[in-house]
Image (cartoon, rainbow, N blue to C red):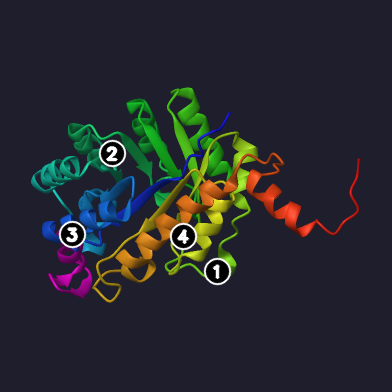
Amino acid sequence: MNTKIKSPFFIAEIGINHNGDLNKAKELIKLASDAGCDAVKFQKRDVDLVYSKEFLDSPRESPWGDTQRDQKEALEFGAFEYKEIDIYCRELSINWFVSAWDLKSQEFLKQFNTKYNKIASPMLKYTDLLKKVAEEGKHTFISTGMSTYDDIDNAVKIFKEQNCSFELMHCVSTYPMREKDANLKMINTLRNKYLCNVGYSGHESGTAISIAAAALGATSIERHITLDRSMYGSDQAASIDFYSLKYLVGAIKKVALAQGDGKKKFLEEEKIIANKLRDHLPKTT
């Protein structure tokens, strides 16, 4: 009996690479859809809860002004933008969801009833947010960058106590990540330690490491995407464009197909070749 091989769930992380422009967000969604991704993901913050007043008032030159507040507020979408995103994603039949960075933002996002939740690596230590997300009962992707086993233990305990479906995502939170820091064997380590599905959230500039993660059995792959890596934004350099994304999704599907079931087979096609290549060997009875 043939067993259908399941490809990793592919998440295109738009994050804040839309630069506060709804049309750019829609371009990125279309890009992800055309490349064959399963979902797109955004980020949501209440800047007054995530950052201090002193930080927000401090200088920062950006296309939107000369303070940190000008830049941070310009990158945030509100209800209107997310309603438009919801409509557009439905039209394209692609899932969308958001990683919240504070309790107010998580509460705000409940109105859209998305299928998934995400815990971003910086939020892994935010126990109140973990509990709030787990209480919703949606399948949740939990990134494990910039964390310790104690942090992961706490998150896993919370989601198990709430009986909330989850999978961990191996992640190294540098932008862009150096190849030598990838430590992909952590995918197996996390799987064996926590007895759960484990994906990979990558911040490298190329595609090879993500393909390798899929070959190691990652159940989900998340990569930042961009319209142009030279655009303004801290995440653009660690993102991939449409052509790299399309190649990556296709390659990962091939990797999933190539995994097989691990059982030795002597294919009919091989038998034909074997008969030719072994014709000179002594015949056995």
Say which mark, if any, is on residue 179.
1
Q: Nearer the viewer, mark 1 or mark 2?
A: 1
Q: Are marks 4 and 3 in contact (CB under 8 Å)?
A: no
Upstream in the sequence, badge 1 or badge 4?
A: 4
Q: What is the spatial separation of the Cα atoms under label 2 and label 4, in whole angstroms?
A: 22 Å
Helix, strand, or loop for circle 1? helix
Report whether residue 101 is seen.
Answer: no
Q: Which residue is mark 4?
A: 173
Q: Which residues are magenta?
A: 57-74
Q: Answer with mark 2 or mark 4, whichever residue precedes in sequence.
A: 2
Residue extending farthest left:
80
From mark 3 to mark 1, how far is it between C-alphas?
29 Å
Residue pictured at 45% horizontal, 69% vertical: 206
Q: How many numbered callouts?
A: 4
Horizontal arrangement in the rendering, residue 243 relative to residue 142 (left or right): left
Residue 33 pos. (x, y %): 26, 51
Relative to residue 117, is residue 165 depicted above or below? Answer: above
Label placed on residue 27: 3
What residue appears at the point 39 percent right and 30 percent down from the top-left corner? 134
Would residue 200 be found to the left or right of residue 260 on screen? left
| Any part of residue 178 in sight | yes
Which of the 4 image quadrants contains residue 83? top left
Q: As displayed, is residue 285 above or below residue 53?
A: above
Earlier residue among tags 3 and 1: 3
Does residue 66 lie above or below 94 as drawn?
Answer: below
